[in-house]
């Protein structure tokens, strides 16, 4: 079923940037060693069930804890357990297992531990009971994906399968380097995607599935309509793909037609949100018995010689992934997932985990630009439509330079125009800047801010609006003033580590 079209009055369309990844996938060599964090994706840390010196196979479960909310963790290589270390993984402290690999590619399915060959399962998925699908999702580790994990009769999510009301499948391509779904969901991938959704529906039968997709992906929408013709409770939502519609609270709010705050998403409200790669992983896990031991990761941005996709084993270090692709002679900033909201990767020796989709590489723009705002921009993106690149199809350029100094607010209202949650960003930011921090800010919806950083991006005066807003939220929380229901979210965000979170936000790109 196709949902009625909805008009979106805020946001920004990003298109035509240099450094967009090509849709070709290269297999990266199996590394000599991998570092596997025992907490990856949704859930708590798992307990190792292997010992130092023990031989392991790629796909074998090396850690699990069926008593806490977690999903099993697998060895991603054939090799020997070398050591256990403590790891600080982007602010999350966890134990990690170092495995020395023999560099062979084959893997086993954790569904049939006695079968040491690939693809141990050739039974039709249609005959699987929901218990069997849940077992496969859990044992292959796929259940750690999504905003709340995937509920199964194992403890993979705090939500039970009976409590799930809505499954939102986020196919929106509104971030700077997102590929269009017409490129990703071609032929076989589209069929796998549809099977993945049907499998999910089978274990969560009372939940309505919503596929949120760019309305311009007409080809895919038509095919989905055909493939899902008789499926009850699967609704396709063609939407205007303007950033930040792809962020969880925004897509959930639009699809469900109600106000969804960041806190709602982090509480048990029956809303599960998954991306396309999770749905494809469900297919692989259930139908082929494939454990979550590798990811397809995009290298995106002008920091790379060739931006494209790589298939890599979990636990490989970031520097091993990017080393052959980085442009020589440039200072490059690497960021997880998005140049707008992603976290700067300070330590490239850290391993890649099961949730990474994209490693952005952007050239550091260190040179000052005097009167930058007065220069014509052939390749600068601009919300104000003052740059030629908005009218003619030059490929637009991004670096970390702010292209000008911070100036006073000119009350242009651009930050207000683009905000998806009706905050008045310049107003709230000004209060925080002047240290006017009290519950007045709550009235002005400071806690509704989803930290998309679009207000900062469009500000012609280069004001770090979203940084001020984040600072304001942190100060209010320290003063004991919180939005109702926000406690869980504050804990989730680990505000003690707030400084290390999103520290590049708002300064990465600016028009
Ligand atoms: S975009 Fe910048 S200059 Fe314009 S109103 Fe907002 S803060 Fe002021
Ligand atoms: S105020 Fe928050 S939600 Fe609104 S545009 Fe700025 S960062 Fe995004």
Image (spheres, helix red, strand yellow):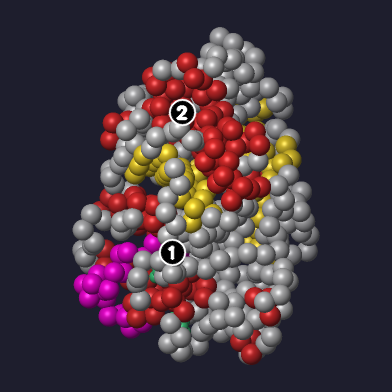
Identify the residue shown where x is 78% and y is 64%.
Answer: 329
User: Start and end of the magenta stretch?
Assistant: 429-453
Taking depth in this image into account, of 362 and 8 the one nearest to the observer is: 8
Describe the element under mark 1 as helix, strand or loop. loop
- Disc ID at residue 7: 1
Where in the image, quadrant-wise, is ligand 2 located?
bottom left
Find out whether residue 443 is within the magenta segment: yes
Badge 2, how many Cα within 10 Å: few under 14, some, many 20+?
Answer: many
Q: For the residues labelled 1 and 2, say whether their Cβ atoms are less than 8 Å apart.
A: no
Whether residue 381 can be seen here: yes
Residue 164 to residue 338: above or below: above
Taking depth in this image into account, of 354 and 34 the one nearest to the observer is: 354
Identify the residue shown where x is 33% and y is 48%.
Answer: 266
Identify the residue shown where x is 58% and y is 70%.
Answer: 509
Image-quadrant location for residue 402: bottom right
Describe the element under mark 2 as helix, strand or loop. helix
Q: Which residue is mark 2?
A: 199
Asked whether mark 2 lies closer than 8 Å to ligand 2, one says: no
């Amino acid at each position: 079923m196709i949902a009625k079209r909805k008009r979106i009055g805020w946001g920004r369309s990003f298109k035509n940037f240099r450094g967009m990844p090509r849709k070709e996938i290269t297999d990266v060599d199996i590394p000599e060693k991998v570092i596997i964090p025992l907490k990856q994706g949704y859930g708590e840390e798992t307990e190792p069930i292997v010992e130092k010196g023990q031989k392991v196979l790629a796909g074998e479960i090396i850690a699990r804890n069926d008593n806490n909310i977690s999903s099993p963790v697998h060895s991603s290589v054939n090799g020997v357990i070398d050591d256990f270390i403590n790891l600080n993984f982007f602010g999350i402290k966890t134990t990690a297992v170092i495995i020395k690999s023999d560099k062979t590619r084959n893997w086993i399915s954790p569904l049939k531990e006695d079968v040491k060959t690939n693809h141990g399962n050739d039974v039709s998925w249609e005959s699987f009971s929901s218990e069997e699908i849940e077992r496969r999702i859990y044992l292959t580790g796929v259940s750690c994906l999504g905003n709340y994990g995937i509920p199964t009769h194992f403890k993979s999510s705090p939500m039970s399968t009976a409590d799930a009301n809505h499954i939102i499948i986020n196919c929106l391509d509104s971030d700077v380097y997102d590929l269009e779904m017409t490129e990703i969901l071609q032929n076989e991938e589209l069929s796998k995607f549809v099977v993945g959704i049907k499998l999910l529906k089978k274990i969560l039968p009372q939940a309505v599935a919503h596929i949120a997709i760019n309305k311009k992906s007409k080809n895919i929408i038509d095919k989905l309509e055909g493939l899902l013709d008789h499926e009850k409770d699967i609704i396709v939502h063609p939407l205007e793909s303007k950033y930040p519609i792809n962020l969880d609270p925004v897509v959930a709010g639009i699809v469900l037609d109600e106000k969804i705050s960041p806190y709602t998403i982090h509480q048990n409200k029956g809303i599960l949100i998954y991306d396309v790669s999770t749905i494809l992983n469900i297919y692989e896990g259930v139908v082929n018995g494939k454990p979550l031991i590798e990811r397809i990761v995009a290298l995106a941005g002008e920091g790379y010689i060739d931006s494209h996709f790589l298939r890599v084993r979990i636990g490989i270090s970031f520097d091993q992934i990017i080393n052959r692709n980085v442009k020589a002679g440039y200072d490059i900033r690497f960021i997880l997932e998005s140049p707008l909201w992603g976290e700067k990767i300070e330590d490239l020796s850290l391993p890649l985990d099961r949730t990474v989709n994209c490693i952005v590489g952007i050239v550091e723009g260190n040179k000052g630009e005097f009167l930058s705002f007065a220069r014509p921009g052939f390749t600068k993106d601009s919300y104000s439509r003052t740059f030629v690149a908005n009218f003619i199809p030059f490929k637009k350029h991004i670096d970390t330079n702010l292209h000008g100094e911070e100036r006073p607010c000119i009350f242009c209202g651009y930050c207000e125009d683009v905000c998806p949650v009706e905050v008045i960003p310049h107003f709230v930011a000004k209060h925080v800047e002047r240290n006017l921090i009290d519950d007045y800010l709550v009235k002005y919806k400071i806690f509704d801010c989803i930290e998309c950083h679009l207000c900062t991006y469009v500000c012609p005066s280069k004001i770090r609006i979203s940084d001020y807003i984040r600072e304001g939220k942190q100060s209010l929380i320290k003063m004991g003033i919180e939005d109702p229901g926000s406690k869980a979210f504050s804990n989730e965000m680990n505000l003690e580590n707030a400084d290390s979170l999103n520290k590049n936000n708002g300064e990465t790109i600016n028009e």
